[in-house]
Amino acid sequence: MSVLTAATRKRIPLADFAGPGESYPIEDRTHAGDAKARAKDALDAGKMTRAEYDRIVEMADRRLGPRKRKLGMAA
């Protein structure tokens, strides 16, 4: 999981958070992937609704963009 300092987190625009209350930052690919993983953990633990999870995943997927295939690797 990537680390954000409090000062860095405060500089992130609100549009770069996928969850409620400035939770689940998705300002870059690393944090978008982390947001999806942490949201899945919260969903599985019963701490998040399916609608909240779906919204976070949708926003993170938009940030991640299309997946690139590596040459020589099967899909």
Image (cartoon, rainbow, N blue to C red):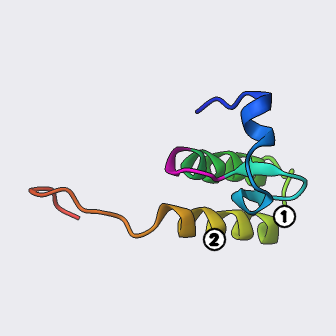
Task: Identify residue for label 2.
Answer: 58
Give the residue pinned by disc 1: 49
Give percent across and percent down for residue 75.
23, 65
Q: Is residue 29 magenta?
A: yes
Q: Is residue 4 left or right of residue 66?
A: right
**Under tag 1, what secondary structure?**
loop
Q: Earlier in the sequence, mark 1 or mark 2?
A: 1
Question: Against 8, is 22 above or below?
Answer: below
In the image, residue 5 sits, relative to residue 61, either above or below, namely above
Q: Residues within 10 Å of mark 1 (few under 14, many from 20)?
A: few
Amino acid, disc 1: Thr
- Name the quadrant containing residue 17: bottom right
What is the span of residues highlighted in magenta in the rendered image?
26-30
Instruction: Give the x, y percent position of residue 66.
Output: 39, 70
Q: Nearer the viewer, mark 1 or mark 2?
A: 2
Separation of residues labelled 1 and 2 (CA atoms): 14 Å
Q: Residue placed at 55% from the left, 70% from the top?
A: 62
Residue type beneath disc 2: Glu
- The residue at the point 70 percent across, 63 percent down is 56
